[in-house]
Image (cartoon, rainbow, N blue to C red):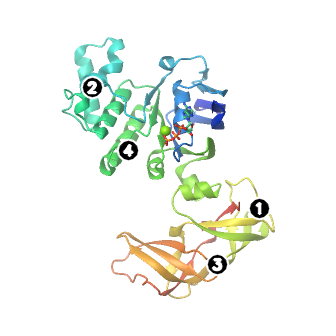
């Protein structure tokens, strides 16, 4: 357990009958951290969150919160509150009473409760909705009420299971900013579940990328994007070009690789990848589309290859290209920023060069 660990998940496993939903997860979450669980549907995100909340018990392992083992602590005695994936609010209560619900045991003066509820209604951009009945709300509005109801209790840890899933894009982005702002000001530890990688990147200090009940990589947004540990993570976060390659030589921090379609290249040994690569190893070379630079003439660059524009899309601030290259059976994606207005774009069918820096290359195991 590290020093600033507030939540410590140690060797946690979860079986439902003979089905293993969580394989064997260990990780620490720091106090005040905005921590996200990211992964495809069914990978175990909700299950892990429910074990933190105490609605499920681990089959094996232990969860510590604030150094206390949680196995014998029922949900309502844990310093956590959960916002559920399907917005659970009481249909027979109005909005004000829904938000104030958790406060009722605290015996606060009525005026104080109203003040706190109004503050929350402002925060979720529903200032005049206090008297509305819950069944007179849209899905997105209900989701926001559920969020307000959890936040008003100012828990030490807030567990959020896709809390913005039902909101439209604009409201979702606004709520993301507000959530982050709120989390910074009150210093609550957030454990946030999403299957939206952009949302996870926008909000999180660190992200655990999950697949099939396991954590594939736990890292900062930058670490996940720049130094993915495997192909799954690399293609789950953003877009990535992959090329088959063979290690020709290894010299300390630098690998020489013979890569299909690119020729002989060099790359930094991937520090996130524990495997280590040796001469003769079959690898995958990965390069992000925005790290490839296009030019009409042969560039004066250490690493370059030629091809033809097979497809292009102009998106305003950037253009996306698919480049057809000799010796490659798939197209290479290139994303270039349109920095200069009216600057020449590359036409369909035109001959082009791509070039890149050695440190743009990520080397991964081939499997
Ligand atoms: N009570 C249960 N009994 C049996 N299997 C379950 C139970 N709860 C979850 N599972 C299974 O465990 C796996 C993980 O489920 P979980 O709800 O944690 O996924 P998730 O990552 O939250 O997915 P989603 O993004 O769709 O919400 C799934 O295969 C699911 O079918
Ligand atoms: Mg879920």
In the depicted structure, whether residue 86 falls above or below residue 53:
below
Which label belongs to residue 176? 4
Residue 358 x/y as whole percent: 64, 70
Residue 356 x/y as whole percent: 58, 74
- Crowding at label 2, few (<14), some or many (≥20) Cα neighbours within 10 Å? many
User: Disc 1 on helix, strand or loop?
Assistant: loop
Residue 265 x/y as whole percent: 68, 75
Q: Nearer the viewer, mark 1 or mark 3?
A: 3
Residue 357 x/y as whole percent: 60, 72
Q: Quadrant of the N terminus?
A: top right
- Crowding at label 3, few (<14), some or many (≥20) Cα neighbours within 10 Å? many
Looking at marks 1 and 4 on the same chain, the residue that comes earlier in the sequence is marked by 4
Which residue lies at the image location 54% right of the left edge and 28% below the top edge? 52
Looking at marks 2 and 3 on the same chain, the residue that comes earlier in the sequence is marked by 2
Asked if labels 3 and 2 touch by Cβ distance under 8 angstroms, the answer is no
Residue that carries the numbered disc 2 in the rendered image: 117
Looking at marks 2 and 1 on the same chain, the residue that comes earlier in the sequence is marked by 2
Residue that carries the numbered disc 1 in the rendered image: 277
In the depicted structure, whether residue 181 falls above or below residue 65:
below
- Crowding at label 1, few (<14), some or many (≥20) Cα neighbours within 10 Å? many
- Compute the Cα span from label 1 to label 4: 40 Å
In the picture provided, is 18 more to the left or to the right than 238?
A: right
- Compute the Cα span from label 2 to label 1: 58 Å
Asked if labels 1 and 2 touch by Cβ distance under 8 angstroms, the answer is no
Q: Is mark 2 within 8 Å of ligand 2?
A: no
Looking at marks 4 and 3 on the same chain, the residue that comes earlier in the sequence is marked by 4
Q: Looking at the image, which is closer to me, 30 or 241?
A: 241
- Compute the Cα span from label 4 to label 3: 41 Å
Quarter-of-image position of residue 139:
top left
- Crowding at label 4, few (<14), some or many (≥20) Cα neighbours within 10 Å? some
For the question of whether residue 1 can be seen, the reply is no
Q: Nearer the viewer, mark 4 or mark 3?
A: 3
């Amino acid at each position: 357990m590290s020093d600033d660990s507030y939540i410590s998940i140690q060797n946690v496993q979860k079986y439902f009958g003979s089905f293993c939903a969580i394989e064997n997860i260990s990780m620490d979450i720091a106090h005040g951290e905005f921590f996200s669980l990211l992964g495809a549907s069914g990978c175990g995100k909700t299950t892990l969150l429910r074990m933190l909340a105490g609605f499920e018990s681990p089959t094996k392992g232990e969860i510590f919160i604030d150094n206390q083992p949680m196995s014998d602590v029922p949900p309502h005695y844990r310093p956590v509150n959960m916002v559920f994936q399907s917005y659970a609010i009481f249909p027979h209560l109005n909005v004000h009473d829904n938000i104030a619900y958790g406060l009722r045991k605290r015996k606060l003066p009525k005026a104080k409760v109203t003040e706190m509820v109004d503050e929350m209604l402002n925060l979720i951009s529903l200032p005049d909705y206090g008297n509305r009945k819950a069944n007179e709300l849209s899905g997105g509005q209900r989701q926001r009420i559920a969020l307000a109801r959890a936040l008003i209790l100012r828990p030490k840890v807030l567990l959020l299971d896709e809390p913005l899933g039902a909101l439209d894009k604009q409201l979702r982005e606004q709520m993301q900013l507000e959530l982050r702002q709120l989390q910074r000001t009150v210093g609550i530890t957030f454990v946030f579940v999403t299957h939206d990688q952009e949302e996870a990147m926008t909000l999180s200090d660190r992200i655990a990328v999950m697949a099939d009940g396991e954590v594939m990589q736990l890292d900062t947004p930058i670490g996940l994007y720049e130094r993915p540990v495997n192909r799954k993570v690399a293609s789950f976060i953003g877009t990535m070009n992959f090329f088959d390659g063979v290690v020709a030589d290894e010299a300390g921090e630098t690998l020489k690789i013979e890569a299909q379609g690119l020729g002989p290249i060099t790359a930094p040994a991937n520090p996130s990848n524990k495997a280590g690569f040796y001469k003769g190893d079959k690898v995958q070379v990965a390069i992000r589309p925005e790290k490839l630079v296009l030019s009409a003439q042969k560039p004066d660059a250490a690493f370059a290859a030629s091809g033809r524009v097979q497809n292009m899309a102009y998106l305003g601030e950037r253009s996306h290209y698919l480049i057809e290259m000799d010796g490659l059976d798939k197209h290479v994606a290139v994303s270039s920023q349109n920095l200069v207005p009216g600057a020449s774009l590359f036409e369909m069918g035109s001959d082009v060069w791509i070039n890149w820096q050695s440190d743009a290359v990520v080397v991964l195991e081939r499997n």
